[in-house]
Amino acid sequence: MVMIIQTYWSMLLKAMGRTLLLCLLSLVFATVIGMIFGLMNVGRSRVLNFIGTVYVDVVRGVPLIVLAYFIYFGIPAGIQSLGFTNFKMGPLLAGTIALSMNCGAYMAEIVRAGIQSVDRGQMEAGRSLGLSYGAGMALIVVPQAVRTMIPSIINQFIITLKDTSILSVIGFPELTNVGKTIMGNTFKNLQAWAIVGIMYLIVITILSKVSKRIERRINRGR
Amino acid sequence: MADKTDVKISVKNLKKNFGSLEVLKDISLEVTEGEVVVLIGPSGSGKSTLLRCLNQLEKVTSGQIVVDGLDVTDKHTDINKVRENIGMVFQHFNLFNHLNVLKNMTLAPVHLKTLSKEEAKEKALQLLSRVGLADKAEAYPSQLSGGQKQRVAIARALEMNPDIMLFDEPTSALDPEMVGEVLAVMKELARDGMTMVVVTHEIGFAREVADRVIFMEGGYIVEEGTPDEVFNHAKEARTIDFLSKVL
């Protein structure tokens, strides 16, 4: 085990870095996607409700690994068959898209539930003062919804960090993929996977602790 | 009847359905400037719905509502602009829970640029002292009693400088000992000449303050008149029956 760490430490740390990069990018896009589709779902427009629901249902109904294959292999194949034979998509791009879409669908549900948890009277009071629907959302409803959403968002972030490992299947050299490489080189299954597992555990534990602190700080202002 | 130019609210043949349920069947009414109209009636009679139609928190099914000369049932009317001029006070206060009292009051006028930040703050502090809560400017809604919340809610509505105030059962969610402080603020408003439409079960308030009492039941206006006419000399059997239960 010590031997593996001595030989592969820089490779492992770089892989961890790529895992975090993939996770961070996906979380940023997922938050935007979640906000957009979540707001579509709570609005009064039937068309937007429908689009929002379809997005959430489709993405949640497809396993992440299948979504990743579809985006990494399926979409370039489709575009190439249209004559753009040079079209390629890197694994980081494909991975970010797949993970953002996946996490975004769950975030949309969190946003929807958060907004619906705010009493309807809050929006009505805002509207009665002359605020538009958008201003009422932005200034009154969403700030209150965010507080109830934070524990679920943190939970979703942790799930997304772990889900990056699934993207080892499309060849992105994140931590799990590098774990496979090390295992292949050393044939030390137990040690290699223990090291990889512990690395995930450390990062996620730190993340949970930091989030708990943020959550407490926000709740104190209530 | 008052001069036509004094009419602040005019409702003609208003109908409102929730799905297949007809809540308002055929309501026509006029409210003139400075008038205090009290709506009474059993629950489910449609009085709150009528009030909520006046500022379009409920969309009407058919009929016409004209407020300050503007047809609020017309899609082309800028309803947000009209609402700036119609304050509303809710049964459950609906203070913005994430903001302190001062921010609750200044949010809308500052966002809508009807007042500058400084003007809004100054005005808010004046209004708070008028409702007896000058020391609560920095408090959050969760730190206030029900009566205090409702007085803040009234002050918040007044901050927009409305011509008309709507009250939707403003004392129904209050502990009995807090009803008086809210009614006192409302009485003062009425004395200052505010046009008010009040849904309430406070018969004492109606007797003392109302210019006109309207009794509603089953989506219709059954009877209306001065407090004396309605409370002491009701003509309709349904009014008499209702009053015998609440008086």
Image (spheres, coloured by chain):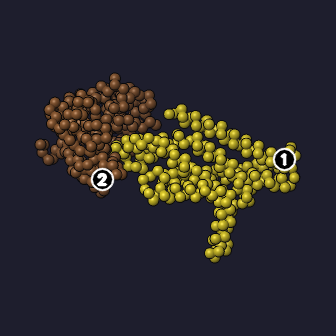
Chain colours: A yellow, B brown
| Closest to the observer, B131 or B117 | B131
Give residue A101's position: percent from left, percent from top.
60, 56
Give residue B141's position: percent from left, percent from top.
42, 32
Q: Nearer the viewer, mark 2 or mark 1?
A: 2
Q: Is residue A37 above or below residue B137?
A: below
Q: Is residue A217 above or below residue B26?
A: above
Disc 1 secondary structure class: helix
**Left or right: where does residue B73 sit relative to residue A60?**
left
- Disc 2 crowd, CA 10 A, few/some/many (<14, 14-19, 20+): some
Q: Which residue is mark 1?
A: A190
Give residue A187's position: percent from left, percent from top.
87, 52
Q: Quadrant of the N terminus of chain B?
A: top left
**Left or right: where does residue B74 sit relative to residue A70?**
left
Q: Is residue B171 above or below residue A9?
A: above
- Disc 1 crowd, CA 10 A, few/some/many (<14, 14-19, 20+): few
- Which picture quadrant has residue B161? top left
**Left or right: where does residue A69 sit relative to residue B130?**
right
Chain containing mark 2: B
| Closest to the observer, B41 or A104 | B41
What residue appears at the point 23 percent right and 47 percent down from the top-left corner? Answer: B27
What residue appears at the point 73 percent right and 53 percent down from the top-left corner? Answer: A174
Give residue B49's position: percent from left, percent from top.
31, 44
Disc 2 secondary structure class: loop
- Which picture quadrant has residue B144? top left
What residue appears at the point 21 percent right and 37 percent down from the top-left corner? Answer: B238
What amino acid type is highlighted by mark number 1?
Leu
- Which picture quadrant has residue B214? top left
**CA separation, marks 2 and 1?**
71 Å
Q: Which residue is mark 2?
A: B61
Q: Which mark is residue B38?
A: none
Chain containing mark 1: A
What amino acid type is highlighted by mark number 2?
Thr
